[in-house]
Amino acid sequence: MNNSFTRHSIRFILLALFQVILFNQINFLGYINPYVYILFILFFPIKNNRTLFIFLSFFLGLTIDMFSDSGGIHAAASVCIAYARPVFLKFAFGTMYEHNNVKFDNTEFGSRLAYIALLTLLHHIILFSLEIFSVSRILLVFQKTLFSGIFTILMITLLSIIFSRKT
């Protein structure tokens, strides 16, 4: 348990730091920005305490908000995807999730990609809807969601392949 706690704490801190220091500085064409910090939420162990997981997701989003001066939109989007995660796990992994048998390193690439893509796009649609907060600019919300989502999905997929434990 102590080793797991240490590993998740380090992952939390590193993802928050890299998001704030490196990834928030990337801004292609004014609306393409990767949000790689959600990697913590996507790959947090399934069997852990759900209340703790939602609190950690809120704290991660709040940390990004404090450094980005974004008024709580990252915290709201992070809590939403943390809360909705079981539905997407069941959709992407089916019976493996129902039997609490999902280990992300041992899943099929297609299922993992679908899971990453769906939760990333949900995060981004919530994030940009709260950021822009205007029905008249809904096309901008969808544009930012689509392009930042694609870039984030690519970054998360590459990072998950690079740091995978599977040999």
Image (cartoon, helix red, strand yellow):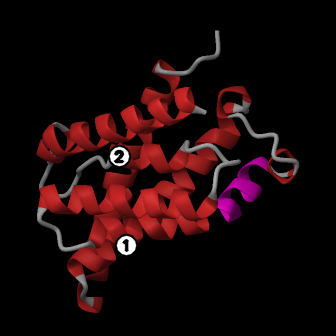
Numbered range of the magenta stretch? 85-93
The residue at the far front in this view is 2
User: Between marks 1 and 2, how big is the CA–CA gap?
Assistant: 14 Å
Question: Looking at the image, which is closer to me, 164 or 100?
Answer: 100
Q: Which residue is mark 1?
A: 76
Question: Looking at the image, which is closer to me, 29 or 16?
Answer: 16
In the visual, does 96 lie left or right of 89? right
Residue 9 seen anywhere in this rendered image of the structure: yes
In the image, which disc is placed on residue 119? none
Compared to residue 72, the image places residue 145 above or below, namely above
Q: Looking at the image, is mark 1 or mark 2 earlier in the sequence?
A: 2
Residue at screen point 46% across, 19% down = 162
Compared to residue 131, the image places residue 13 above or below, namely above
The residue at the far top in this view is 167
The mark tally for this picture is 2
Q: Quadrant of residue 2?
A: top right
Residue at screen point 17% across, 37% down = 22
Residue 151 image position (x, y, % from top left): 34, 44
Name the residue type under label 1: Ala
Residue 71 image position (x, y, % from top left): 18, 74
Residue 143 seen anywhere in this rendered image of the structure: no
Q: Dot 1: few (<14), some (14–19), or many (≥20) neighbours within 10 Å?
A: many
Q: Dot 2: few (<14), some (14–19), or many (≥20) neighbours within 10 Å?
A: many
Residue at screen point 22% across, 79% down = 132
Q: Quadrant of the N terminus?
A: top right
Name the residue type under label 2: Tyr
Q: Quadrant of residue 129?
A: bottom left
Residue at screen point 82% across, 40% down = 101
Q: Which residue is mark 2?
A: 37
In the visual, does 101 lie left or right of 158? right
The residue at the far bottom in this view is 135
